[in-house]
Amino acid sequence: MALRCAVKLGIPDAIHRSGGTATLRDLRAALSLPEARQEHLSRLMRLLAALGLFTEDNKGGDAAGLYLYGLTPASPLLVHDAEANGGACQSQFVISATALSANLTAYLRLDEWFKSDGGAPAAETPFMMAYGMDFWAANGRDAERAARFNEQMGSESKLVARVLVRECGEVFPEGVASLVDVGGGDGTMARAIARAFPHVRCSVLELPHVVESVRSAAGSDGGAVEFIAGDMMDSIPPADAVLLKFVLHDWGDEDCVRILRRCREAISANAPEGKVVIIDIVVGASSSTSTTTKDVYEAQLLMDMCIMVLSTGKERDEETWSKIFMDAGFTRYKIRPVLGARSVIEVYP
Ligand SMILES: C[S@@+](CC[C@H](N)C(=O)[O-])C[C@H]1O[C@@H](n2cnc3c(N)ncnc32)[C@H](O)[C@@H]1O
Ligand SMILES: O=c1cc(-c2ccc(O)cc2)oc2c(O)c(O)ccc12
C-alpha cells in the first residue's frame, strides 16, 4: 500500500523530473502536498528507501525537509518516461495488484477459501470465490479490465525482452524461421523477438477476445506480428518454435502436459528439430547477479501465492517441470536462469 501510494502520488516521476534527486521539501512542493503532510511524507520515504526503492541521505543536515532522496536501479521501473526504462514501466502492475476492483478482492478471500473443500467450481480458486468466474472469463466480460491486464503484462514483457535479446540470442538461431507465441497477450514479446531476430516470422495465438481488442487498438492488425484467435488446449499452429511465457504457471500439471503435447504436434508438423521455449519461474533457480538468492526465492514464492489466489496453477521446481516435459513426450531440456526470478527453459522433442 505504501508503494501504491508512492506511485499514485507520482513520487518516482517527480524525483526523475527533478534530475534524479530531490529534497523532501522540494518533493512535497513538486507533488503539491500540504506542509502538514511533510512529516508523513518523510515516514513514507524512509520505508521506501529501506526497501531499496529510493536512496536517502541527510548530508544537507538533520532537518527532515533537507533529507535528499534519489533513484536506485529499481526506481526507473516506476517512472513513466519511456526513455528511463525502454517503455517497461511497471507502475500499472503496482496499481492492479493493490486495487480492490482488480485482484485484491480475491486476495481478501484467501483464508475463507482455505477452509472450503475446493470441490465446487465456485470455490476452485479465491478469485472464483470472489468473482464467480475464472480470471480469463472475467477479462473476457470486461474489456477495460482485460486491456489493463494486457498492458501490464506487455510492460513486463518489454523488461524481459531486453534481457532475452541481450543474453539469449542463441535461443533463436538462423534455423528458427517461425515462432508462435502461445497466450502471447498483446504481442509485445512477439514483436520484440521479430525486431531483434528479423529471420524469425512471429505470430501470436490468443483467446478471441484478446485478438479482437489488439486488432481494434492497432487499427486492423497487430503490426508486424500475425494474430490467430484460438484455444491452445485444442490446437497450436505449426511453427519451428513455440513460446510459452507465463502461460504454464496458470495451469495444473495435467493441463500443462496437454498444452505441451499440442506444442509438440505444432513443432513436429513443421520442424522435427524444433523446440518449445518457456519463460516461467523455476523455484530455486536463480542467476543471482545483483539480487541475492534469498530475494529471488522470496519473489518466486510470493508469485506462487498470487497464482494460488488467481488461478489453478502454481510455480514449479525443476523436478516438477522435468516430469511434465517427459509426460508430454519431450526428451531433454535446458534451464537458463537469466531473468532474475524467471528462467528461460528450452524443451526438445
Ligand atoms: C499470464 S498471461 C501471459 C501473457 C503473455 N504471454 C506474457 O507473458 O506477457 C496468460 C495469457 O494466456 C492467455 N490464454 C488463457 N487461456 C488461453 C487459451 N486457452 N488459449 C490461448 N491463450 C490463452 C490469456 O489470454 C493471457 O494473455
Ligand atoms: O497479475 C498477474 C501477474 C503475472 C505476472 C507477473 C510478473 C511476472 O514476471 C510474470 C507474470 O501473472 C499473472 C497471471 O499469470 C495470471 O493468471 C493472473 C494475473 C497475473
Image (cartoon, rainbow, N blue to C red):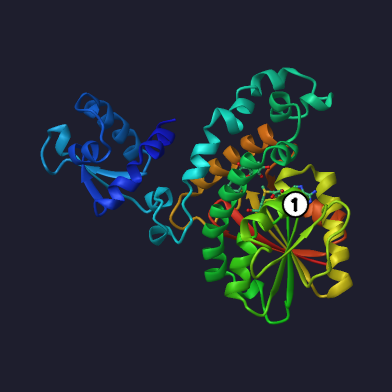
Which quadrant would residue 85 be assigned to in this image?
bottom left
Residue at screen point 34% across, 45% down: 12
Amino acid at pointer 1: Trp
State the image coordinates of residue 270 (x, y, percent, origin top left). Answer: 85, 74
Which quadrant would residue 103 be assigned to in this image?
top right
Mark 1 crowdedness (10 Å alpha carbons): few <14, some 14-19, many ≥20: some
State the image coordinates of residue 273 (x, y, percent, origin top left). Answer: 81, 75
Residue 221 visible to the viewer: yes
Left/right of residue 37 with respect to residue 260 in the rendered view? left
Residue 279 visible to the viewer: no
Q: Point out the quarter of the image occupied by ligand 2.
A: top right
Left/right of residue 296 with respect to residue 184 in the rendered view? left
Image position of 294 with respect to 84: above or below? above
Q: Which residue is mark 1?
A: 321
State the image coordinates of residue 57 (x, y, percent, origin top left). Answer: 20, 43
Helix, strand or loop under label 1: helix
Q: Quadrant of the C terminus?
A: bottom right
Residue at screen point 63% across, 35% down: 305
Left/right of residue 249 with respect to residue 147 in the rendered view? right
